[in-house]
Amino acid sequence: MSKLLHIDSSVRAINNLNPEHNSLSKSIALRFVDVWNDKRPKDEYIYRDVGVNPPEFITQDWIGAVFTPDEKRSEDQKSILALSDEMIDEVSSSDIIVISSPMYNYGMPAQLKAWFDQIVRINKTFSFDLSRGDFPLQPILSGKTLVTITSSGEFGFEKGGVREGSGHLAPHLRTLSKYLGVETTYEIACEYQEFGDSRHQASVANALNQAEVLASELSTSISTL
Ligand SMILES: Cc1cc2nc3c(=O)[nH]c(=O)nc-3n(C[C@H](O)[C@H](O)[C@H](O)COP(=O)(O)O)c2cc1C
């Protein structure tokens, strides 16, 4: 048995009265998860929609609580960190993480960034040691597989693409993923939403198909715990 953690982050719902308003990133992630759950019905599954229910932004008190040793934390500080503790537990106990994200202003939604800010935490998901020289941060978690599913209105954010320099979503996810303990990443991108033309239709179909194939392949190859 393994555990799949599924994080959605679009503010759009998956089913709207007008289907043109449906979130693409959530729909593609759902295709992946449906196939996964079908193939591995005994796996544990955790879901968070941080787009609709965003985690709180971190505060100065949050930082103060993080840097207070466990045994010295006040009840107030413990409650400030309760959500962070819970979400870190979800990450650390999972084997495969699916993160779906729209591109907002060339990066991730603030809601998803808030999730990462609550999770990338000293002595929980990374250690800090100046004896390591210029690279004092090291991830604590390991061995996880990440699937990122992104949707954008424009296109060409990939390496060599016409908007390579503006594509901050996938690179940011890649950089942060190591603090989730990710060792293997798969990326599925859907583009052209704002054009609404045949390129967009082809991109959606291709992303849905990739999600289905990847879920099918990974569900048989991932090690069972
Ligand atoms: C607030 C906002 C900002 C956006 N910024 C960008 C952007 O910078 N680049 C882009 O290509 N598309 C941008 N888009 C388009 C979305 O990425 C596109 O609609 C995507 O499909 C949204 O994901 P979803 O369908 O899962 O909701 C933006 C959309 C919104 C609502």
Image (tube, rainbow, N blue to C red):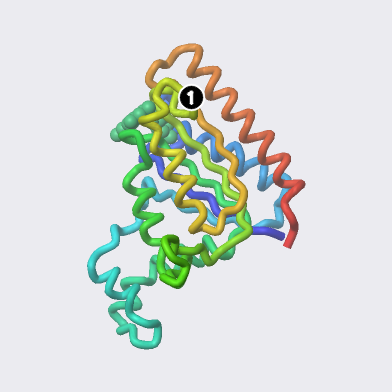
Residue at 27% from the left image edge and 74% from the top image edge: 64
Name the one closer to the observer, 44 or 76: 76
Left/right placement of residue 92 relative to residue 11 reads: right
Going by the numbered disc 1, the residue's amino acid type is Gly
Residue at 43% from the left image edge and 69% from the top image edge: 128
Tell me if residue 158 comes above or below residue 139 in the rendering.
above
Left/right placement of residue 179 relative to residue 115 reads: right
Name the one closer to the observer, 175 or 117: 175
Q: In this view of the protein, can residue 35 be seen by the observer?
A: yes
Give percent across and percent down for residue 98.
55, 47
Q: Residue furthest bottom?
A: 71
Q: Which quarter of the frame holds ligand 1?
A: top left
Q: Residue furthest left?
A: 60
Residue at 40% from the left image edge and 55% from the top image edge: 116
Tell me if residue 134 comes above or below residue 28 in the rendering.
below
SS under mark 1: loop
Quadrant hosting residue 55: bottom left
Quadrant hosting residue 4: bottom right
Q: In this view of the protein, can residue 16 be seen by the observer?
A: no
